[in-house]
Image (cartoon, coloured by chain):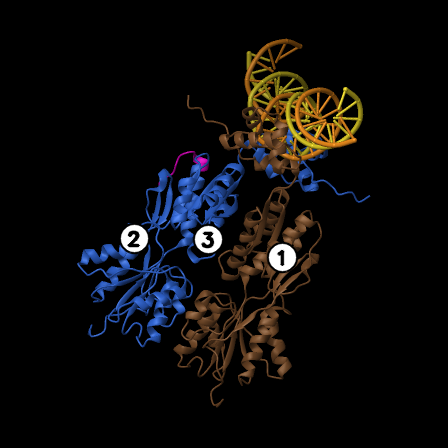
Chain colours: A brown, B blue, C yellow, D orange
Amino acid sequence: MDAVEKTPGLVDVAAAAGVSLSTVSRVITGRTPVSERTRIRVMDAVERLGYRPNAAAQALVSGRSSTVAVIAKNTLRWGYAATLQGIEEEARAAGYTVMIAVVESSEPEELGRATDLVWSQSLAGAIVIDFDAVGSATMAALPHNIPVVAASGARSDGMGRPHAFLDDLEGGRTATEYLLSLGHETVHHVAIPATSEHSGREWGWRQALTASGSSIPPVIRASYHPESGYEAARQLPPDATAVLCGNDELAIGVARFLQENGRRVPVDVSVMGFDDQPFAAMWVPALSTVRQDFVDLGRRTFGLLLQWIQGGEVPPDSTASPRLVIRESTAHPPNTRS
Amino acid sequence: MDAVEKTPGLVDVAAAAGVSLSTVSRVITGRTPVSERTRIRVMDAVERLGYRPNAAAQALVSGRSSTVAVIAKNTLRWGYAATLQGIEEEARAAGYTVMIAVVESSEPEELGRATDLVWSQSLAGAIVIDFDAVGSATMAALPHNIPVVAASGARSDGMGRPHAFLDDLEGGRTATEYLLSLGHETVHHVAIPATSEHSGREWGWRQALTASGSSIPPVIRASYHPESGYEAARQLPPDATAVLCGNDELAIGVARFLQENGRRVPVDVSVMGFDDQPFAAMWVPALSTVRQDFVDLGRRTFGLLLQWIQGGEVPPDSTASPRLVIRESTAHPPNTRS
DNA sequence: TAATTTCTGACCAACGTTTGCAGAGTGCTC
DNA sequence: GAGCACTCTGCAAACGTTGGTCAGAAATTA
């Protein structure tokens, strides 16, 4: 008849191995001791029948699955994708499956989808990629019935939940200080959309400028895309000699605009990126930038979550410092002999 | 006492609404008619209690969840990430959740994780991102108990399963023909790792060269990264005037090497990319490339899967043609007056 | 040999849903 | 006013696990 054969269950394995259902369950879960002899027999039957535990049944009875959800505004842009990658690597190593949920805006309906997910799936935990305002709103909206941690670009209040983060503020500050140390009178800033006013790359830039007593030029706001950097560069005053960009893509847009308008990089103006995306080193001139290790951030974030899930204790925050990568796009200002 | 309140179930809603459990279920699923009056009452109770259906229980009883798995070798590289993004968008719109599973190699153990996933989760379906040899191996390994479709870069045998694809072959051919039409004697190729010998970008390049009777230079093999393109470029003969690269990242690596060695792009040598990544237009000179719409590919792939899940019929393949994007990095060969 | 320990089997109650079947209620027709 | 269809609702059985209790069997120790 070639019947559609049902996937084998614990009962079938028990029958095949000539033991009881409970014994099979004990072998599978390993939580109760079973003699080596029967263990072998059972595993043999498992093998023969190709038995796979039914995740839905497990989740139903135990109330938890071994799935974690990653909630993010985006999955394509560099920082997000790299963080996701890191999370996935660690999750895989720990035997967890990753579910993704994109929340595009802070509309109640959108946030509702995220909370619904957290309620309805029996998740082991959730990770919010909190690089933007939507991420923060999501953090606030999520229920407290499961462990939730965030990966973010700045130390934040954290809604009382653990964060792993990349110190964007320090990155912005360090980069600005470096540019200043080269002799630039001030540093302009083309910013990515920020999570909050007083944190992140922009705030670090502002701090460094304030500390050195330099004038603080108005921030030029852009989105995340290269074209947006290109457009933003129009607002740069003609006497600008250094510009720190919110990310590498913006930087290449800015650099292109500058070059098209007869200003040489880095001879006439220094351009600095942020993130150290793969293309940065190949740019001509090679982009000086601030390396942010997003993959590592993802790993650390999952590590935090795992600690919480397994240890039961809410883990402490985790930080990492960015690293300045000096290449060719930054130099002393013109009219300076070093 | 502040007891840890259990999340409400169908029973609780039923009690609150003063109807039976089954009636609530019917209201929720909507598959069986229920009088408007009771529907209102039930929905009201649902609202009040904040009821969310338990996905595990649904999956258990029905044998299917509304989750689809995306299986890929990578989630960070452009093509993969963009395809994933497209899949997620469509899935979200259709009310499906997306689970990701990374399979890094064709090792049995790795493939086993993918098949385990497909067996143990009660997936509605799965999508394999089949851009590489691992993808193909995964396709072959996956069981036939659920709908599986692939997103790929080349028409392939498809293991009898539906494919949505991007016509890489046509892209490679068109790009090469374009370069040839500019007057170049032949076109060199720096290749990304290929799925199979007789398909994809490289094969399109070869076809075009063969068709025009041009000599076919040895393929220079590289990985996916910009640095790899830079290294690969060392193997380019000094008299090369045109090089087609397997992707944009390789192209910028190649271009940089060339420029460092005193060869101007495009005056001395034309460099062409593939994919049209966001940075391509901002490159100096702006990169001529072949645009592949991966996000759209992802959408189409999910569409195929949905058709299969809902319609029951195995859907036909879906193709899209790449588009040549001519910018500044390609030109007539030197010693040519146009 | 007796006393103890370790393992196994049988059985059952959950977990939160879906769904087939049958019963209750309503309105309509003649 | 009875009969009939019809719509709506409730009951109960599944789905595949986990984990508990209890009793017996087997292996180990005294």
Label 3: few (<14), some or many (≥20) within 10 Å?
some
Label 2: few (<14), some or many (≥20) within 10 Å?
many
Q: Which residue does the numbered mark 3 point to in the structure image? A: B74
Q: Which residue does the numbered mark 2 point to in the structure image? A: B169
Label 3 marks a residue whose chain is: B
Which numbered disc covers residue B110?
Answer: none
Which SS class for mark 1? strand
Name the amino acid, label 2: Leu
Magenta stretch contains residue B225:
no
Tell me residue B95's x, y (percent). Answer: 53, 43
Please report contact status of discs 3 and 1: CB closer than 8 Å, yes or no. no
Report the predominant secondary structure element of the magenta stretch. Answer: loop
Q: CA distance from mark 2 to mark 3?
A: 22 Å
Magenta stretch contains residue B314:
yes
Q: Which residue does the numbered mark 1 point to in the structure image? A: A150
Label 2 marks a residue whose chain is: B
Label 1 marks a residue whose chain is: A
Tell me residue B291's x, y (percent). Answer: 36, 59
Residue B248 shows in the view: yes
Image-based side of B6 in relation to A51, left or right: right
